[in-house]
Image (cartoon, grey):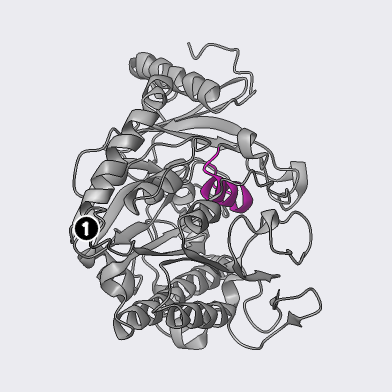
Amino acid sequence: MPTSRYCRRQFLRAAAGTAALSLLGGRDAEAEPRQPNLLYVFSDQHRDCSLPGEPFSDIQAPNMTRLAKEGVRFRNCIANYPVCSPYRATLITGKWPYHSGVIDNGIRVVSDGNSFGDVFRRAGYRTGYVGKWHLQGRGGVYEEPGLGRHGFDWWRVWYRTNNHWDTSFYFEDSPDAKRTPKGYNATLMADQALDFIRRNRDAQPWCLFLSLNPPHSNFLDAPDEQKQLYDPAARPWRPNVAERRRQNERLRATAQGYSAHITAVDKELGRLLGALDETGQAQNTIVVYTADHGEMLGSHDRTGKRLPWEESCRVPFFARWPGAIPAGREVEAMLGAIDIMPSLCSLAGLPVPATCDGLDLSAAFRGGTAQEPESQFLMHIDKHHASGGINHPAPLFRGVRTKRYTYARWPDGPWLLYDNQEDPFQQHNLIDDPTRKALASELDGLVQDWLKTADDPCDLTLANA
């Protein structure tokens, strides 16, 4: 159960850390190798099913395909809380929402000095963050160096990023130096990341986060070059999109723009991979591409996120580190957002803070066997800061995703049960199937265990039966 697995966290960290040092060639006094760089690229709202080669997907993303061939792809990467700020707080702090305090958008994350950037900076890394932050609370706030930056020294955080052309802004080195450059903001952010990569090629190891806003809405303002690749009248819709939705012109245009934004993000990823090649840093850089959550895009008669369905909570996750991560592998391990910080710290040979709530799955990155969780916790805790506030249509829920099943419930009773092996598009809700009663009860027990593990005060008092 989750609680017992997490009790073994310290042992797993110690073992994984030893293995990571071995991969780095040891730590003898005569020749201490440089630790690997880390380039963590994540977009906003990119779902796993919108990748090249997935069923009913016509996405063109050759650089993501390249990462999959040259590294590892996690097939079950789960956004535990599929909303922007809660995901980012979990990523940066390694904590569950009720531990970080970020239970919805619009809430400022408070540093305890053990965030992702802090760990790498203490290890001698040059640290940087570029792009959407969405952890400052309300409004665009210049962050002075210190705890507000969570260990990231080089700071190019952007605001008002949902309109992707000409209106986004960032601060450069002082609160008076506000910059609003013209262009597609994903390209402008990537330009800054490229500058960081090139400037630090001969310096100490570096850790850079690049947070891109597309394919998040505005869906309609994708670059024309990429829009031309997708015909809105010839979209390969997923089977769980109703026919009336498929004929909706607005949704067709949205789908075209969504796909085009993904291809535009892929273009920027290609520029970054090219810079690593050109500067001779590719061999010693861990490269990650992932996303904070997905997008329903008409599936189950929904748009947006904040939901337990696959389109909302399952996201891409690719990782490459030549010589350390075997190439061309697909891994079925359940990797949650909660596990990313401990796994990448350990992979790079750095200590994992005791404040991290997740598991170290770095062995799965390296081709070994990890002590993986049997499930990932799913949740939608609060929506006061959603569009429409408490009237937002996405319900509050808690649930679990295992390799085979998705189960979710409202506080006062069960809601969804899917067999994802037999029903990959989740079209047959089994929650009222009397033959699945025992299964639903077992999964409900996992939810109860996760609530305790995450110190989630939600009171699920009614029995599943």
Q: What segment carries the magenta color?
A: 81-95
Can residue 205 be spotted in the picture? yes
Residue at image position (18%, 57%) is 326
Q: Describe the element under mark 1 as helix, strand or loop.
A: loop
Which residue ends up furthest to the front in the rendered image?
A: 30
The answer to whether 139 is drawn above or below residue 391 in the figure is below
Picture quarter containing residue 316?
bottom left
Residue at image position (63%, 40%) is 100
Picture quarter containing residue 188?
bottom right
Closest to the observer, 446 or 38:
38
- The residue wearing badge 1 is 324
Q: Left or right: where does residue 71 sit relative to residue 101?
A: left
Give coordinates of residue 256: x percent, y percent: 48, 73
Residue at image position (21%, 66%) is 69
Give coordinates of residue 228: x percent, y percent: 44, 85
Quadrant of image for the N terminus: top left
Closest to the observer, 405 or 177:
177
The answer to whether 446 is drawn above or below residue 153 in the figure is above
Residue 34 belongs to the span the image colors magenta: no
Closest to the observer, 175 or 140:
175
The answer to whether 444 is drawn above or below residue 288 in the figure is above
- Name the magenta segment's main secondary structure: helix
Give coordinates of residue 40: x percent, y percent: 44, 63
Number of labelled discs? 1
Q: Amino acid at mark 1?
A: Ala
Can residue 298 be spotted in the picture? no
